[in-house]
Image: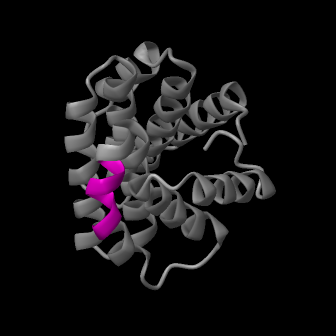
Amino acid sequence: QGRLEEAARAFNESAGIFADIGEFGPRRWGLAGGVLAAAQTGDPTAALDALDASPPVAMRVMHPDVERARAWCEAMTGHTDAAAARLTAAAEFALARGSRGLALAAYHDLARVGHVEGARAAAGPIGDAAIGTEGELCRLRLAHVQAMAAEDPEALAEVAAGWESIGATLF
């Protein structure tokens, strides 16, 4: 809902709690969420350093979100090609494991960081990823990418109204 500082604090708090109880997989996911929030504010360095310092874990269920966090840091520092490659890989990783919601998020981010080229690259695969998903967030992610790829201002306006209706004004 656009409250990035609050989100970063909550993610980092969860990372600390998980570290305290020895749950390093969920700790890493909390750190990745903190990086995503920090990248959106334009200051991902400290958060990314904390993520980089955390050891990889065998349980990789949220690996696509960890990679999304890294991709946003790349995008925010002008490395959009690297970000696009990382997001594509994250989406493919998620799809290969049946994590359609995580794939949708990565493909949506691909469109957001690559603008029209990213949207066109994501337009086909995101439709496959959306099969069987439910909820307004998934529907809007799909519609957003499709509207960007088509360069359709009317459809983009409809998507913007949809984001606003669910309180997702950051998208």
Using the image as rendered, state which of residue 59 and residue 93 is in the foreground: 93
Using the image as rendered, state which of residue 150 and residue 167 is in the foreground: 150
Residue 39 position within the rendered picture, expressed as x and y whole percent measured from the top left: 48, 25
Judged from this view, the residue extending furthest toward the bottom is 132
Taking the spot 31% from the left edge, 19% from the top edge, the residue there is 78
Confirm whether residue 66 shows in the render.
no
Residue 25 relative to residue 6: left or right: left
Using the image as rendered, state which of residue 151 and residue 89 is in the foreground: 151
Residue 27 position within the rendered picture, expressed as x and y whole percent measured from the top left: 46, 41
User: From the viewer's perspective, is residue 161 above or below residue 136?
Assistant: above
Taking the spot 80% from the left edge, 57% from the top edge, the residue there is 165
Using the image as rendered, state which of residue 130 and residue 97 is in the foreground: 130
Magenta stretch containing residue 46, yes or no? no
Residue 62 position within the rendered picture, expressed as x and y whole percent measured from the top left: 39, 55
Taking the spot 30% from the left edge, 64% from the top edge, the residue there is 94
Mark count: 0
Q: Main secondary structure of the magenta part?
A: helix
User: From the viewer's perspective, is residue 163 above or below residue 40?
Assistant: below
Magenta region = 118-124
Residue 166 relative to residue 18: left or right: right
Residue 48 position within the rendered picture, expressed as x and y whole percent measured from the top left: 38, 23
User: From the viewer's perspective, is residue 100 above or below residue 25?
Assistant: below
Confirm whether residue 98 shows in the render.
yes
Taking the spot 45% from the left edge, 57% from the top edge, the residue there is 145
In the figure, residue 9 lies in which quadrant?
Answer: top right
User: From the viewer's perspective, is residue 27 above or below residue 44?
Assistant: below
Residue 77 relative to residue 156: left or right: left
